[in-house]
């Protein structure tokens, strides 16, 4: 158990440059929230729902992170900073990183039954701050959800999702193969479509200005015919 704890703390240090020692990581609210959730989930699985909710309520008060006791979470899960909400039927794989203000939310079932309402997050996924992943969808392995993205549909393996509503922006293989991309958003690739659009607009503006300059320029004085007196 001690070795698993050390491995978990080291996995966080590998993803976050801020802590100098493992002792600092032990003070992270995400670490405490996960520890409380392990306890609450054990009680939930034992049908001790009130006690599970009690642990969940205490965890939310002291960490600012709300993880429903029914959520299933794999190894090396890291919530950076906190203020995150994870719903009851959410499933999270191994080595998943979530930044602040993220919601793994549910949809209202139309058949009156609870069922699967929340997302399934596969291994090695990174979810940027403020992102909202809603409904019983699957986020594929090694996908990246950009900051403030709204994700309502299935996410392919290795895709980067950006914008509202998020669209798929497949990244180059050399980016996809990286062990870890901070904040789930490569700096260049998701911005490329915007850059192309801006460059196109700048070119059109320049062409229009050239046309206006040509119209505003004084015309050449007509050459007078005949000889001077």
Image (cartoon, helix red, strand yellow):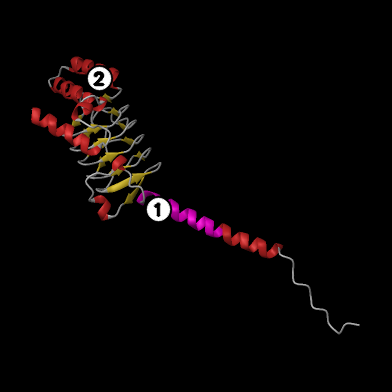
Q: Is residue 154 visible?
A: no
Q: What percent of the width, then of the height, locates residue 16?
A: 26, 36
Image-based side of 88 in relation to 131, left or right: left
Please tell me which residue lies in front, 81 or 88.
Answer: 81
The image quadrant that residue 57 belongs to is top left
Question: What span is colored magenta in the figure?
Answer: 189-204
- The answer for how far apart the CA atoms under marks 1 and 2 are is 41 Å
From the image, tell me which residue sits under label 1. Answer: 192
Q: Is residue 61 visible?
A: yes
Kindly state the secondary structure of the residue where label 2 is placed: helix
Please tell me which residue lies in front, 48 or 54.
Answer: 54
Q: What percent of the width, then of the height, locates residue 37?
A: 20, 24
Magenta span: predominant SS is helix
Image-based side of 168 in relation to 120, left or right: right
Q: Residue furthest right?
A: 229
With respect to residue 193, does 44 lie above or below?
above
Residue at (33% x, 47% y) in the render: 186
From the image, tell me which residue sits under label 2. Answer: 59
């Amino acid at each position: 158990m001690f070795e698993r704890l050390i491995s978990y703390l080291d996995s966080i240090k590998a993803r976050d440059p801020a802590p100098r020692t493992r002792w600092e990581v032990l003070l992270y609210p995400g670490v405490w929230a996960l520890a409380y959730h392990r306890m609450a989930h054990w009680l939930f699985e034992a049908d001790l729902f009130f006690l599970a909710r009690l642990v969940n309520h205490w965890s939310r008060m002291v960490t600012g992170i709300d993880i429903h006791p029914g959520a299933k979470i794999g190894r090396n899960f890291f919530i950076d900073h906190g203020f995150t909400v994870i719903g009851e039927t959410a499933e999270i794989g191994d080595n998943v990183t979530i930044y602040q203000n993220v919601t793994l939310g549910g949809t209202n079932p139309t058949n009156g039954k609870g069922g699967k309402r929340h997302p399934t997050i596969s291994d090695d996924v990174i979810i940027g701050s403020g992102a909202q992943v809603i409904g019983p969808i699957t986020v594929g392995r090694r996908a990246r959800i950009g900051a403030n993205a709204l994700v309502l549909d299935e996410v392919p393996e290795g895709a980067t999702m950006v914008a509202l509503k998020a669209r798929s922006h497949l990244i180059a293989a050399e980016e996809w193969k990286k062990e870890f991309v901070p904040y789930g958003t490569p700096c260049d690739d998701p911005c490329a479509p915007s850059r192309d659009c801006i460059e196109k607009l700048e070119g059109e503006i320049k062409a229009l200005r050239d046309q206006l300059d040509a119209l505003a320029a004084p015309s050449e004085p007509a050459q007078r015919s005949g000889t001077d007196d």
